[in-house]
């Protein structure tokens, strides 16, 4: 943001915003989100923000407009769908394009959370931008009818990563009176599709860092999505035999090591459906190849200012939505985005889904940039995430970077007691 100047662009899309969020002390003073928005506007960059009606969205839009930011509410989802849950930022500079995508909202009360956001630079960022622009233009059509989604992509370069963007959108409602949205008329569930194929193709390991981690219920088919047109066209639905949880059970039964770190089912804050978590844990039980199913020990901390209660922070709460597949093999794969492992994020079977946005990527480079050379980028990313999990209990901790260590060795290191105390709880059915 600090590099955006005249004719550069910044577009925020989120589930929640706080314009006056404390942003960083990196530059020698405590600066909030609004400081950076104002500075970018003062340099004549175009800055936009797309919020939702929930979470005091209208209030945040009004505050953003006071800062000369173009800000809108997107409420274009059918009845029964909770919200647009996408979380992304596009920064278009003259020199390069940057897209940040994952589980992080620019919002307060998230100190001490575990979450993941990836930065994509170059052609991939421009491709991902199209998802954000089509949502913006569905609320505010472009002047002259010239859509930003039709802009040509820059020429490909020797990119180190290969990316694939995936989304969830519920189908249109039958009654579209007053409906402006033009994209994904019949719904889109490519997020679910890619995830199913990645699980089904896993050969050695799956690591999931996830907020909900629960059963998904009936799988979508080409004939059973809620709402939509008739006949329903569902080419995005995968040709897989069963639900995500049964795909996981199949992989575990075939020797794939499953490691999960999730939010604590008892809270704080409490999960919406702890029984669905217990059901999934029970399904995955396997004596020959037991999965490693862990939950963090989250805790509530009250924050006071000058003796007055301000808010409650939930330390060590897992908000990530990150999958890492076969990170020690020849074809590692990573999926990061906004979708949780629960029905509302991925399918529109019993109720319309939320909207979600994610990116899957493979990489030709090793993990040097993440502090672990001579291993795959995916493995280095997992180790970085595991290091961060342990650092919440021991800030000076460093996870050993040993390329010859086995996955079992690394799991043992993750589970090692800190101060004589297990840093995790095992999930129970």
Image (cartoon, helix red, strand yellow):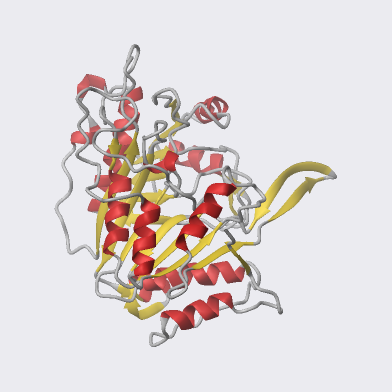
Q: Horizontal and vertical percent for residue 62? A: 54, 25
Is 233 placed above or below 129 here? above
Between 308 and 238, the residue placed more toward the observer is 238
Q: Residue furthest top?
A: 177
For the point 33% across and 70% down, the residue is 254
Quadrant showing the C terminus: bottom right
Dividing the picture into quarters, in which one does residue 218 lie?
A: top left
Can residue 36 be seen by looking at this rendering?
yes
Q: Report whether 410 appears left or right of 328.
A: right
Q: Against 11, is 331 above or below?
A: below
Residue 98 location (% of width, % of height): 33, 51
**Residue 219 falls in which quadrant of the image?**
top left
Query: Is residue 57 rendered to the left or right of residue 192?
Result: right
Q: Is residue 121 visible?
A: no
* Left or right: 300, with 368 as reference point: right
Q: Vertically, is 57 above or below 409?
A: above
Q: Going 46% across and 39% down the picture, which residue do you hit?
A: 14
Q: Residue 148, percent across and down? A: 24, 33
Please report the residue visible at 18 percent of the width from the left and 37 percent of the height from the top.
151
Q: Quadrant of residue 237?
A: top left
């Amino acid at each position: 943001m600090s590099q955006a100047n005249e004719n550069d662009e910044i577009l925020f899309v989120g589930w929640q915003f706080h314009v006056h969020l404390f942003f960083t002390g990196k530059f020698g003073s405590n600066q909030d989100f609004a400081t950076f928005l104002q500075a970018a506007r003062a340099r004549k960059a175009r800055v936009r923000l797309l919020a939702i009606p929930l979470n005091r969205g209208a209030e945040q839009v009004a505050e953003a407009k006071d800062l000369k930011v173009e800000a809108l509410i997107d409420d274009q989802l059918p009845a029964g769908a909770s919200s647009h849950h996408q979380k992304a930022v596009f920064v278009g500079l003259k020199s390069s394009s940057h897209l940040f995508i994952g589980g992080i909202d620019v919002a307060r009360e998230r100190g001490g959370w575990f979450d993941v956001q990836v930065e994509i630079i170059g052609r991939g960022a421009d491709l991902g931008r199209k998802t954000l622009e089509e949502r913006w233009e569905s609320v505010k059509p472009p002047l002259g009818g010239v859509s930003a989604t039709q802009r040509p992509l820059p020429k490909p370069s020797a990119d180190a990563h290969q990316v694939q963007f995936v989304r969830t959108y519920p189908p249109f409602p039958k009654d579209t009176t007053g409906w402006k949205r033009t994209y994904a008329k019949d719904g889109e569930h490519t997020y679910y599709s890619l995830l199913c194929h990645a699980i089904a193709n896993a050969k050695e390991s799956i690591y999931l860092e996830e907020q909900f981690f629960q059963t998904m219920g009936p799988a979508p088919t080409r004939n059973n999505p809620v709402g939509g047109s008739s006949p329903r066209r569902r080419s995005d639905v995968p040709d897989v035999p069963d639900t995500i949880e049964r795909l996981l059970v199949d992989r575990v039964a075939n020797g794939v090591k499953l490691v999960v770190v999730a939010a604590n089912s008892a809270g704080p804050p409490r999960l919406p459906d702890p029984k669905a978590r217990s059901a999934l844990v029970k399904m995955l039980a396997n004596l020959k190849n037991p999965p490693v199913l862990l939950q963090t020990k989250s805790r509530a901390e009250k924050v006071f200012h000058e003796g007055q209660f301000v808010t409650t922070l939930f330390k060590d709460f897992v908000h990530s939505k990150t999958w890492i597949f076969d990170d020690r093999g020849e074809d590692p794969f990573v999926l990061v985005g906004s979708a949780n492992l629960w029905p509302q994020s991925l399918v529109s079977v019993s109720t319309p889904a939320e909207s979600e946005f994610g990116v899957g990527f493979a990489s030709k480079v090793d993990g040097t940039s993440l502090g672990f050379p001579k291993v795959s980028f995916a493995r280095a990313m997992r180790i970085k995430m595991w290091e961060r999990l342990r650092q919440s209990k021991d800030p000076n901790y460093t996870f050993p970077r040993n390329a010859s260590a086995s996955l079992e060795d690394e799991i043992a290191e993750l589970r090692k007691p800190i101060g004589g105390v297990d840093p995790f709880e095992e999930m129970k059915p």
